[in-house]
Amino acid sequence: MMSSSKWTFCVCLLTCLLNWSVSEDHQQITVKTGDDVTLQCLDHRGGDIKLLEWMKQDLEEDVFVFRHGNMSKDLQHPSFINRVELKDPEMKDGDVSLILKNVTVNDAGTYECYVRKSNTQPPPQLISNITITVIDSGGEAGDISDGGDKDGRLRLLVFMTLVVVGVVF
């Protein structure tokens, strides 16, 4: 029979692993210059969205900001004005995906989608992290979107669970 300290350790470790496995979604996308690309971001927590921020890691200004029911162009980086829009302006079912139009080589980089549900909640929560690679439109494109490494994350979770069970028993 397993001691209570081993049982507590297993429960804590598995909880941490499960939280890590369902944390923000990371995607990698390859896109050609001149194409449009959808940056997927789904917030399944329910409730009204008070703040939506799309950021690019190498910029100080935002790619897209939705606050108090309106898009805020005054907080937006100039290179994204009139080139980004919500896939679903009503954000039904937590779909806060962003369409980036007429991609340029300067759009390459890592984008982050943050959502805050209430005015009193602490900083917005990171929901999705997307890295875009841009290739010249004359070049060969690989997969347009591979959806990230969800299978690898699952394999790691299963492996870690087996290790924990093996150590405890």
Image: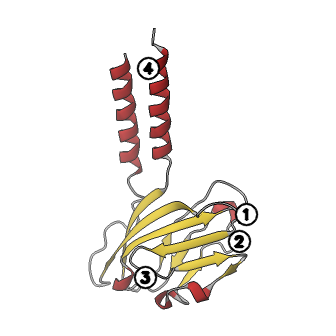
Secondary structure of residue under mark 1? loop
Mark seen at residue 48: 1
Q: Residue furthest left?
A: 139
Query: Pointer 4: residues within 10 angstroms few (<14), some, or many (20+)?
Result: few
Closer-to-camera residue (8/17): 8
> Where is mark 4, residue-wise?
6
> Where is mark 2, residue-wise?
90
Query: Pointer 3: residues within 10 angstroms few (<14), some, or many (20+)?
Result: few
> Does label 4 or label 2 sit earlier along the sequence?
4
Mark seen at residue 35: 3
> Does label 1 or label 3 sit earlier along the sequence?
3
State left or right for residue 117 relative to residue 102.
right
Q: Amino acid at mark 2?
A: Glu
Q: Amino acid at mark 1?
A: Asp
> Does label 3 or label 4 sit earlier along the sequence?
4
State left or right for residue 57 relative to residue 63.
left
